[in-house]
Amino acid sequence: MSNKLFDGIIPNEPPVHGQSDAHAVKSRLEWGEPAFTILDVRGSDQPMLETRKAYNECHIMGAMLMPIDELVDLAKSSLHKNRDIYVYAENDEKASQAAQMLRDAGFTSVSSLRGGLGAWRAIAGPIEGTETVTPPEADDYNVVSRIKNHLETQQKEV
């Protein structure tokens, strides 16, 4: 049943592609969509202590740390197979590898985040960690402002 009052205001959930750009993920995050997960798989060549340190210093707000060598087991035990999942790593190749590992394990809606944390920071995506914290702005709690920001983000050229 469609509610004419909200037609054109509340956007449909975008489809998840094999690769996504930072704008698409940020747009979903700004809209406050709860139906997706961001996974940080950086540090696959480092000891776990170094991986945890890098994550604690800076990561995409709300991202879960899942080292690539434990990725499938951790994901199977904590995520629904139909959940939208975005993965980022040190580089696009490792992110694509991690996304493919999840697809091979039966996850149906997985995308690698093109450009990773660097691309996310370039568009001022919210981050958290000891390095820097993106504090919430006053407008983050105002639904009308969030809708306006979402629509503006959707119209930006990538």
Image (cartoon, rainbow, N blue to C red):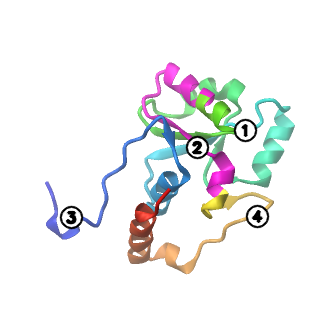
Residue on which disc 4 sits: 132
Disc 3 secondary structure class: loop
Disc 1 secondary structure class: loop
Residue type at tag 2: Arg
Residue on which disc 1 sits: 42
Residue 45, placed above or below residue 35: above
Q: Which mark is first along the chain, 1 or 3?
A: 3
Q: Where the N terminus falls, by quadrant?
A: bottom left
Q: Which residues are magenta?
A: 97-120
Q: Position of residue 128 (x, y in %)?
A: 70, 59
Q: Residue at x 15, y 58 (%)?
A: 2
Q: Position of residue 37 (x, y in %)?
A: 53, 44
Residue on which disc 2 sits: 114
Residue at the outermost top position: 104
Q: Residue at x 76, y 64 (%)?
A: 132
Q: Which mark is first along the chain, 1 or 4?
A: 1
Residue type at tag 4: Thr
- Measured in 3D between alpha carbons, the distance from the residue under mark 4 to the one under mark 3, in whole angstroms, is 38 Å
- Measured in 3D between alpha carbons, the distance from the residue under mark 2 to the one under mark 3, in whole angstroms, is 31 Å
Residue on which disc 3 sits: 7
